[in-house]
Amino acid sequence: MHTHEAHAHCCGHAHAEGVDPCHCGAPYTLEAFRRISADLDRRQMLGGMAAVVGMFAGFGLAEKPAWAAGPGQAVRLTNLSYFDGVTLSIQRGRDIVVQGGRITALIAPGEAFEGAVVRDCGGRTVIPGLIDCHWHSTLVAVSMIAALTQDIGFVHLMAGREAGATLRRGFTTVRDVGGPAFGLKMAIDRGALPGPRIFPSGAMVSQTSGHGDFRLLSELPRMPGTPANQIEQQGVALIADGADAVLRAVREQLMKGASQIKIMAGGGVSSLYDPLDTTQYTEREMRAAVEAAEDWGTYVCAHVYTPGGIRRAVKAGVKSIEHGQLADEETVRVMAGEGVWWSIQPFLADEDANPKDDPVQQAKQEEVAEGTVRAFELARKHRVPMAFGTDILFNPAGTGSQGRQLAKFARFMTPLQALHTATGAAGQLLALSGERAPYLAPLGVIRPGAAADLLVVNGDPSASLDFLDDPEANLPMIMKGGAAIKDQLG
């Protein structure tokens, strides 16, 4: 019997007799009912969480790592060369010692280190775990129509399955730039299922008619009393117009645990009703987002392609431009002068492009692809800091191309420069989250104190990154936080 039912049952008898022997209305009784109700709610919530974890286990997600060293146990990787994520050369003459989830030492092969479990890498190269700086954890493994219409439980279960696949491709960290990833992150961090570290942005903040406004035309107009639509209710995007509304939207995502904020500053490919050339959000609205984020010690990244939108975002204080393939040279100079990051993707209208059936979307996709090569050239010419990202979106069949898309970066730079954008450089971008960063150890590097996120690879990263196209065959060991998710070293 629920507490409110017990209260009604007891009071019903009392009123029939004209007395109140149970003291149901007394303050101390009401407080007791409140405590009991809270406890029941808590138990119900825990039961629901257990059921979800049980579903994941039955879904093949709650697998155990190949091995994980105990709290005081050290692991020594030997017989290896390594790329440290920063220095653009392969280094030799060191073993890597891991303990307590971190890299604790780089020591000479003959140097004594008592009590460590030794893993022989067989002369292979070790690299930092890969980082995808433009990922949508909950939107990548479902179609757009499924994301817009299906039960949110289905969307989250598919995201959970894809999280494990992401990790097995060697991506130990992702920066999630839009979607309800908070629960998934919590489940991964608590060990309920395998997956990468997640830097969540929460809902993408968009103006009306912006890239995050996925409403149908039949849903217009939006009146003051119109409730949030399904996309907003699920936490995929939030429509906010005016500085005050933007402040509230950003603060809500920070309250949920966002490590950085994502705003829509220009038109997009996937959305049907915002032309690619549009500039979205006024400078004042963008500044509102930036100020709210800075008050929490973090930053704003902005989806935008065009020169005008990029310059407005940079002027407002945005620290990371997402995409930007249509930037002109003067705009790139501005980005370089302000030290703004370029989170760029190899959009080439090839077999790995996100599928688009609508002619409007297809035309926008082709326009972006035409600007991609020049964007890479300008970024390198003006030394804009670049970080790798894929933006695989609403594309279940395309998720396996994640590593291959990093290999494509080597078309525009050396293989180690490309690898740097997904390791050391990406770690620098993540560090802009400051105190909002959900993980304390440095990421994307091999050095003492850094997170023990490591890949042993079959291949020479200084010659080619093509080995990433087949992670099952070419990543014999995947380590995250000092635990071997996969170990086939023999």
Image: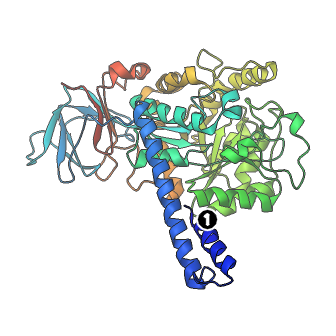
| Residue 157 position in % (x across, y down) | 52, 35
Give me the residue at 52% from left, 76% from top.
32
Give me the residue at 56% from left, 44% from top.
181
| Residue 348 position in % (x across, y down) | 63, 20
- Amino acid carrying label 1: it is Glu
Residue lying farthest front? 17
Quadrant of the image occupied by residue 165: top left
| Residue 283 position in % (x across, y down) | 79, 54
Give me the residue at 59% from left, 26% from top.
346
| Numbered marks: total | 1
Determine if residue 59 is in view. Answer: yes
Does residue 336 lie above or below 146 as drawn?
Answer: below
Quadrant of the image containing the N terminus: bottom right
Image side of residue 185 versus residue 126, left or right:
right
Give me the residue at 19% from left, 43% from top.
75
Q: Residues within 10 Å of mark 1 (few under 14, many from 20)?
A: few
Quadrant of the image containing the C terminus: top left
Q: Could you say which is closer to the camera, residue 266 or residue 147? A: 147
| Residue 449 position in % (x across, y down) | 31, 53
Does residue 164 lie above or below 5 as drawn?
Answer: above
Q: Mark 1 highlights which residue?
A: 5
- Judged from the image, the secondary structure of the residue bearing numbered disc 1 is helix
